[in-house]
Image (spheres, helix red, strand yellow):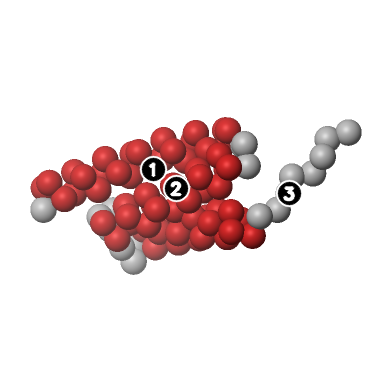
Amino acid sequence: MARPKKSNTYIDTLGWTGVILVIGAYALLSFGAIKADLWFQVPTLMGSLAVALEAWLKKDKQPAILNFIFAAIALLAVIRLLITA
């Protein structure tokens, strides 16, 4: 029988904070409150990294890899925005 995963409050908080950042940024972008600039890319980058780290620490590889890739895309967007500013 598989053992249930132990809960770690700090890791769980990190993951939920990341979820809130990504969903919040996406909602603000979708409703026209912000543009796809640093106000979108930075929270997306930080949120994706938080979710990726939380998933990695819990050995949940699929969401970890997905969010590391998403964070890499956001990082490249931040760099591009800073270079062209």
Q: CA distance from mark 1 to mark 3?
A: 26 Å
Confirm or deny contact between disc 1 and disc 3 (CB under 8 A): no
Q: Is residue 5 above or below residue 25?
A: above
User: Of callouts 1 and 3, which one flags the residue occurring earlier in the amino acid sequence?
Assistant: 3
Circle on res. 81: none
Left or right placement of residue 42 versus residue 84 in this view: right
User: Of callouts 1 and 2, which one flags the residue occurring earlier in the amino acid sequence?
Assistant: 2
Question: Mark 2: which amino acid?
Answer: Ser
Of all residues shown, which one is farthest toward the bottom? 33
Mark 2 surroundings: few (<14), some (14-19) or many (≥20) residues within 10 A: many
Q: Nearer the viewer, mark 1 or mark 3?
A: 3
Identify which residue is drawn at 61% across, 56% down: 12
Question: Mark 1: which amino acid?
Answer: Ala
- 31 or 58: nearer the viewer: 58
Asked where in the image residue 73 lies, by quadrant, the reply is top left
Per the image, the residue denoted by label 3 is 6
Per the image, the residue denoted by label 2 is 48
Identify which residue is drawn at 55% across, 47% down: 54
Whether residue 23 is visible to the viewer of this picture, yes or no, is: no
Confirm or deny contact between disc 1 and disc 2 (CB under 8 A): yes
Per the image, the residue denoted by label 1 is 71
> Residue 79 location, x and y as percent?
21, 45
Left or right placement of residue 83 versus residue 76 in this view: left
Confirm or deny contact between disc 2 and disc 3 (CB under 8 A): no
> Residue 51 location, x and y as percent?
51, 48
Asked where in the image residue 58 lies, by quadrant, the reply is top right
Identify which residue is drawn at 51% across, 45% down: 53
Mark 3 surroundings: few (<14), some (14-19) or many (≥20) residues within 10 A: few
